[in-house]
Image (spheres, helix red, strand yellow):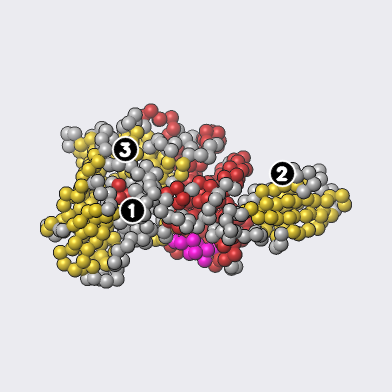
Amino acid sequence: MLKIKFLFIAMLAAVLVGCSGNGQSTAALDELEDSAAIDITYCRAHWWMRPDTMFIKGAVTTYFKSADSKIRSIDFDLVRHLQVDSVVSHNRQLVFSHSGDSLTVTLPDALAQGVTDSVVVYYHGELKSTGLGSIGTNREEHTIWTLSAPYGARDWWPCRQNLLDKIDSMDINVTCPIEYKVAANGVIISDVADENEHTTHFSVRHPLNYYTIGVAVGNYLTKEGQSVLSTSDTVPLVHYYWPSNSLSVRGLMTYLNIVMNIFSDYFTPYPFADEKYGQASIGGDISMEHQTMSFLTDADNLALMAHELAHQWFGNHVTCKGWSSIWINEGFATFSELLFLERVSSIFVEDWHDYTISNALQAKGTVYVTDTTSHDTIFDEATTYRRGAMVLVMLRNEIGEPAFQQGCRMILERFGNGFATIEDARQCFEQAADTSLVDFFNLWIYGGGYPQFTVDFDNSQIGKTIIDIQQSAVKTKDSDSDFFPMHLTVRLVGKNARKDVRLHLTSPQQQFVVESDFKVNNVIFDPNKNILGTWQRKKDNKRN
Ligand SMILES: [Zn+2]
């Protein structure tokens, strides 16, 4: 998910085309408060939606089993103003109660552990948007869409808002007026029309989260392509766009192919290659990475598209295990913007660092989210996205690129199709780097604040430069650290020479003597902007 902010877009589009030649505040919790751990094995949904009305009608079949004990009922999340018409199982009407945004269905017989059963919920009503905009409409472009993260799925369908259990597979059917197209997860199996309406059937055969199920119905045209990976796998690509925005698709498939290959090579091959990767325009100001079908505010924003595509690895293939660990989704997706820029256009890398650092310095909280009841806290730009991304930049700086990349791959391989906590990720990076990262994570993920450097150098002796580094901490809360140990790169710059030296900062005040075979005219501290902090020169108080 991303709000539009980082703008260097049109220029970058030109670069790429040229080089290629062608939540509501809520008491909802991460974990359902069910008496038993219920495993959803399959869903079959049929929704009737249209862009000119907020009315929805639905029939959702859920297959489930109890993972640990006998159960007598199953709970769903569904807003109270949507009317449940009936709940049916094996041709029998079941007893249910629907209050407080919770639908409890009483099973006719107790269901033993491990035995699968199913219920169908028939419902209808007026859609009302909450949170980050769980239901969006664009009247001008005749489009309606859903955006469920973090707690908005219950605004439009009976689901289980649970970050402990993915739906193993799903069939999605959407019926809408004949003149509109439907964008949704998975692969289109059929599209059956009568005189006025048509029903599009999507098949999803990878596990997916309740909040990454998305449907958009609109006045769309589609452009299709494919991406060929270095593994020789092909990924079908599709982009849904409005006729008014047809210029935006120029060069788009080429671009998507480039980014798809960057992430597939760096992380692991695209996890949903046997389904697709799609994008649909929705307007507004929030984009969302529905599994295999991102909804985009702006199809010209290449960094945004890279961000949402990266979520297919971090967010969809591996999902945060509870919103406290949202870093698994947003920290990695935001960092992936940099991975993309480093490989296609180095001129924008410094812009990314400047933007990200200046925002991350505004963070008030910790990357580990302590209050998961508010979508504003979970998806805080400065903390979750920008500080979260800089933590990964600094982690890469500490353990080196090979171990960092291996750690990313380990997370995907170990927790793909499931969930990972921040601690799970830490252990992967520790194993890859063969070192403890407890202190690093305590400082940067579970703690706030940042270092404030006051630096100086003496270059009066040829061949020997004396470097002074003082560090004080800017705190955002009482428990933040007084000192941030780290490895810092400094660059000695001469007339026709330069030398990078890696210093180990182990105390708040240190002096280093660095030798060089040239006369040093200047010293640049952290030349690649890998550190979240502020810098000033001691003597003249100028920013370095
Ligand atoms: Zn995101």
N-term-proximal mark, 1 vs 2: 1
Mark 1: few/some/many CA within 10 Å (<14, 14-19, 20+) = many
Where does the magenta region start and end? 420-429
Foreground residue among 479 and 114? 479
Foreground residue among 328 and 472? 472
Amino acid tagged 1: Tyr
Q: Which residue is mark 2?
A: 543
Question: Element type at marker 1?
Answer: helix
Residue 400 % position (x, y): 62, 59
Q: Which residue is mark 3?
A: 144
Residue at 65%, 55% in the rendered image: 473
Which image quadrant is residue 420 in? bottom left
Residue at 39%, 37% in the rendered image: 281
N-term-proximal mark, 3 vs 1: 3
For the question of whether residue 336 can be seen, the reply is: no
Mark 3: few/some/many CA within 10 Å (<14, 14-19, 20+) = many
Residue at 37%, 57% in the rendered image: 29
Task: Label the magenta part by its dominant secondary structure.
Answer: helix
Q: Could you tell me which quadrant the C terminus lies in?
A: top right
Q: Which residue is mark 1?
A: 210
